[in-house]
Amino acid sequence: MNLDLQYLKLLSLAHYILGGIAAAFSSAAIVRFFLRFSRIVGHMGPPWHGHIAGGPGLLAILYGIGGLAFAVCLIVSGRYLSKQINYAFCLVVAAISCIFVPVGTVLGVLTLIVLTRPSVQELFERHRGEAH
């Protein structure tokens, strides 16, 4: 069982790291949106009626917000893994992280492998009633 706790601590650390990286890249997308938007507004002039091809990149802001939400979920999942609480949340975040190839896939698969072990499920069951 001590090995299971070590696995969960390592996975928790990996979730924190990947969450930080995801937050940094997502923030970069949001900054890019605002830089591009300010450049477009600056070229339009005071009445701001004109159109510049390409727009300010609304997809960048959507990717940024989605990425920040995913980063927060990764960090929260890392916290839950370290405390062995909220098994279902950790399982769902691990499954979703498999979409993000290659690092998210590796982390997600390893997390799913560890979480599906009966001994790890018992650890989460023991902490089910505890406060966060």
Image (cartoon, rainbow, N blue to C red):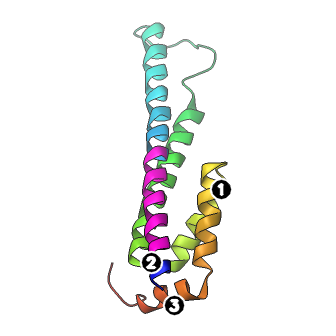
Question: Splitting the image into 4 quarters, where does residue 76 fall?
Answer: bottom left
- Residue type at mark 1: give it: Thr
Q: Nearer the viewer, mark 3 or mark 2?
A: 2
The alpha-carbon separation of the residues under discs 1 and 2 comes to 22 Å
Q: Which residue is mark 3?
A: 122
Q: Is residue 57 above or below residue 7?
A: above
- Residue type at mark 3: give it: Glu
Q: Is 49 in the magenta? A: no
Q: Is residue 21 above or below residue 86?
A: above
Extreme-front residue of the structure: 3
- Residue type at mark 2: give it: Leu
Q: Nearer the viewer, residue 111 or 76?
A: 111
Q: Residues within 10 Å of mark 2 (few under 14, many from 20)?
A: some
**Image position, residue 128 (x, y; %):** 43, 88
Q: Which residue is mark 1?
A: 105
Residue at horizontal 50 percent and vertical 79 percent from the top:
4
Mark before the other along the chain sequence, 1 or 2: 2
Q: Nearer the viewer, residue 127 or 9?
A: 9
Residue at horizontal 64 percent and vertical 50 percent from the top:
100
Q: Give the side of residue 101 with respect to residue 55, left or right.
A: right
Residue 97 visible in image: no
Q: Which residue is mark 2?
A: 5
Circle 2 SS class: helix
Q: Which residues are magenta?
A: 5-21
Residue at horizontal 49 percent and vertical 51 percent from the top:
18
Question: Splitting the image into 4 quarters, where does residue 108 fall?
Answer: bottom right
**Image position, residue 95 (x, y; %):** 64, 65
Assign the C terminus to one quadrant of the image.
bottom left
